[in-house]
Each structure stands twice: as structure tokens, then as C-alpha cells.
Amino acid sequence: MLDIAEELHRWVEQGRDFAVATVVATSGSAPRQPGAALAVDTDGTAIGSVSGGCVEGAVYELCQEALRTGETVLERFGYSDDDAFAVGLTCGGVIDILITPVRAGAVPPAPATPTASPASFGLAASLGSLAGAGAAGEADSDEAAPAVQPPSDAGHGASRTLIAAIAATAQGEPMALARVVRGPAGLLGRALLVRPGGERTGTLGGHPELDRVATEETAALLDAGRTGTVEIGTGSGTGGGAGFGAQGGGPAGGGSAETDTATGTGAETDRGAETDTATGTDTATGTDTATGTDTDAETDTATETDTDTERTGSRCGDPVVLLVESSVPAPRMIVFGAIDFASALVRVGRFLNYHVTVCDARPVFATKARFPDADEIVVDWPHRYLEAQEAAGLLDTRTVLCVLTHDAKFDVPLLERALRLPVAYVGAMGSRRTHLDRLERLRSIGLTEIELNRLRSPIGLDLGARTPEETALSIAAEIVANRRGGTGVPLTGAHTPIHHDVTSTVDRIGSVA
């Protein structure tokens, strides 16, 4: 959703209500990654995209429906085992999409914080009663809805948090937005916002301990500048959420009807993929024997939480899965060496949305006239500048270092430091002969083979590049392949995935009851 925050911020300032559809999980060759969004306002204006065109029409209608009902829903689009071409996504793959109505024009003040003691009931019991309440609420919803239904109090809370996240992103403030995308129906779409240092806005509404753990995990993704999913388990017995991977790399739907039933909610439906499974989910949610629909069952669950949950997991069987979207400053690309190849690389780096710095010890070359596209030009010895940036905490795991100086007196002291930093990429220009000489110099000053193996040299992929622009493209291609887990081989005739995910393991957290 944050990819269209600037446009949404204008809508909020104009008081325009809207519904936003966000990709929360993908599998196969889904064209957009988790966090991609499409929004529709009450006038029917649409911005953004969730599928590159495959299912935009259906999602547009779902957004309009959400504006009418005021309900948050989770939908799935894609293939099924029994239907080769399910509704939409003819390009292949499965996507799960969360549709949330947002009231920009009339958001009431925040309700008072509940005063219930966290020690009075466990998280598992809390989630169980929420699941039961969700099922009961569905059973009692026979009355006709008005043409445009305002969101519930929970919806107002989510609207406030989403609006705060939109404003922060539009203003360039670092923060992360966490939303419940799977779990008890009463929590679906709930949101909280986390800023650096752990400051929190909003609540997931289930239990204070759920907010605490969610805040910690969201802050961890914010520190890494990552967007991904996190599963907060209510015990070792839960099998849900297995369909979600960090950064959206896992399959969207899990491997079986049982898994989807355990993790699904009454609000979730299935567009073309595993239709029977979706129907089963509603049936399972309606019975709700484990969580307890009546008061006595809920009391028993709460009483047994401290003993049974630790041994067998949550009685309700529903972990909570969060989509966490991080909004952080652009990743850094630092280009050492103010040469013609650097000028082309600066342009490509800006195109890839890096904040690009050019550093060179020679003031005659490091000038704005030579590098008009650079965000920053620094005249300093490369290794000294890198040390200063590290000391100031201005380097992170997304930082890219490109050493184009091609001169041992600059390269060696710089690489000695660079290869020991937790940055994303370190590449150095030079011939193979230069590379071998450089390795020997680095070994002689104490670098290990593990550290040397991090060096991408000669820099770039083999594209047969000759010109500065072609060389810059070669370097950029290697940076992207390194970031996304690509192989660099032609896709024609290959049997490798088109879209890679370098961190596809689900982040699981143990019982917090």
C-alpha cells in the first residue's frame, strides 16, 4: 500500500473515502509482490495495481463492494488443481489480496484503551473468543446493509492507523505498518504503526501481549528495511500460516485444505482457486468447537490456557499472520572513483531508486558538473569516507558499494574495510589480472577467504559490455541478481523460476500466551 502513499495522502487531505486492495502473499509467477496495492475511491477513481492487469477488474469491484459494506475481506486469485484456468491470473500463479475500506472524511476519536489486565487471560484464549465472536457475528448478519456502510469501531481504528501510515510515508518518515492478514475474523485488517525506537500507533485489538510481540517483530523488519510477513504463533500445535513467506516468497495458499481451514477466516473467499476449500473454511469457522462459541467453552479455554497451550498449542488453532510494510529512506549506492563509467552507473543507480553518492579523493574529477545526477558528491579518500559513514551508522544491509577507482592505493585500504561490513554488495572494477593481484594484496593484510569471497570482481555480469552505459547496465544487473537471488542466465530455455525470493522462510514466533 505504501507504494501509492503519496496519491492516497492527497485523497485523505481531500476527505475522500476509499478502499485499498493490497497483495499479502504470492506464489508462482505472480507479477506483483506483497505490498503492491490498488485503491478505489467513492467516485470510482482507481490508482495503483495488484497484478499488472490480470485481475484488476475483479479487484476493482471488490473495492467498490468494501466501500458499500464497510467490511475488510481477504480474497484469493489463481489456479486450482481442478481448473487449469481459474478466474484471473492467466499469467500463472496465486495471489492473496486484502481489501480494506478507509474512511478519510469522518474518522472519530480513538476509543479508550481497554483496562483488562494482561494476566487475567492468555493470548490463546483471547484469540479463541475473537474467533468465536467472528463466527457468531456472521450468523447474526441477516439484515440488509445500507448502500454505503461505515466501518465498525475496529474499522475506524484501522482507518486511523492506515491514514497515519500514509501521511508518514508521504512525508518521508521512516516507519513500518503491520496488518493482520490471517487469523481470527475479529482481527482481520487490524493495523499498528511502528516508528524507529519502537514507538507504536494503533492496536491489533486482540490482547496487549499480541501488540507487544507484533511491535517487536515489526520493528525488526523496519530496522532491516524489509517488507514481508510474520507469523505470531499461539503455540507449537498451530499449523497455520504456512502459506506465507517472508517478503512474500512462500506459496499463497498452503499445501492442503486442512491448512487453509485452520488459518483462514470467515471473511476469506477464493476466486477461482480451491473453491471447495474456501467453502470448507466457512464451515470450519462456523463450528468453532475448539475455540468455543458459547460462554462456558470460552471460560474453559481461558482456564486451561496456561497449562494446555504450552503443551499442545492454541485451542483455537489460529495463529496471527501479519503483513509488514516498511517505509524507509532509499537504499544507498556509493560509487568510488569519479570516472566516466561512474557517471553512467550513477544514472542507472538513480533509475533503480538508490540514493547515489560519488566519492573520490581528486577534487578536479569529483564535481557536480561531471555528475549532475548524483545525490551527493564527496571529495575524500575512499576508505576514510567509508569509515566515517560506518561510524555515523549510515550504512546498512541494503547498501551497495561499487569500487571503480582501479588503483591499488585507493582500492586495497577501501576493500579491507568494505569486505568486513554487513552491506549488500561489494564490487570492484578491473581485469582478471588486476583482480588476482588485488586478492593477494588483501590476503597479505589479513583478510580471510570467507571475506574475500564476498567480493564481486571483476564487477558486473558478462554482457559483452564495452561502453560506460553498457558496463553500468552489467553492474546494475549483477546488483539486482544479488538482491533478488537471480542466476544471471538467459530465461529462454531455462527451467529456473522467473521470480526469485532470497528469503522465503516463514518467520515464526513461539507461544506468547
Image (spheres, rainbow, N blue to C red):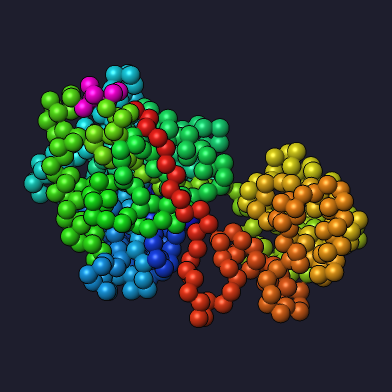
Q: Left or right: 447 with respect to 278?
A: right
Q: Left or right: 163 with respect to 471?
A: left
Compare residues 308 and 240 and report the one nearer the observer: 308
Residue 443 pos. (x, y %) = 83, 52
Q: Quadrant of residue 164?
A: top left
Q: Is residue 302 magenta?
A: yes
**Vertical order, 12 against 124 (above or below):** below
**Residue beneath the point at 12% across and 25% down:** 296
The residues colored magenta run: 301-307
Residue 109 seen by the camera? no
Q: Report the predominant secondary structure element of the magenta stretch.
A: helix
**Vertical order, 97 against 120 (above or below):** below
**Residue beneath the point at 34% across and 25% down:** 113
Residue 55 pos. (x, y %) = 32, 68
Q: Left or right: 74 with respect to 218?
A: left
**Residue beneath the point at 12% across and 30% down:** 294
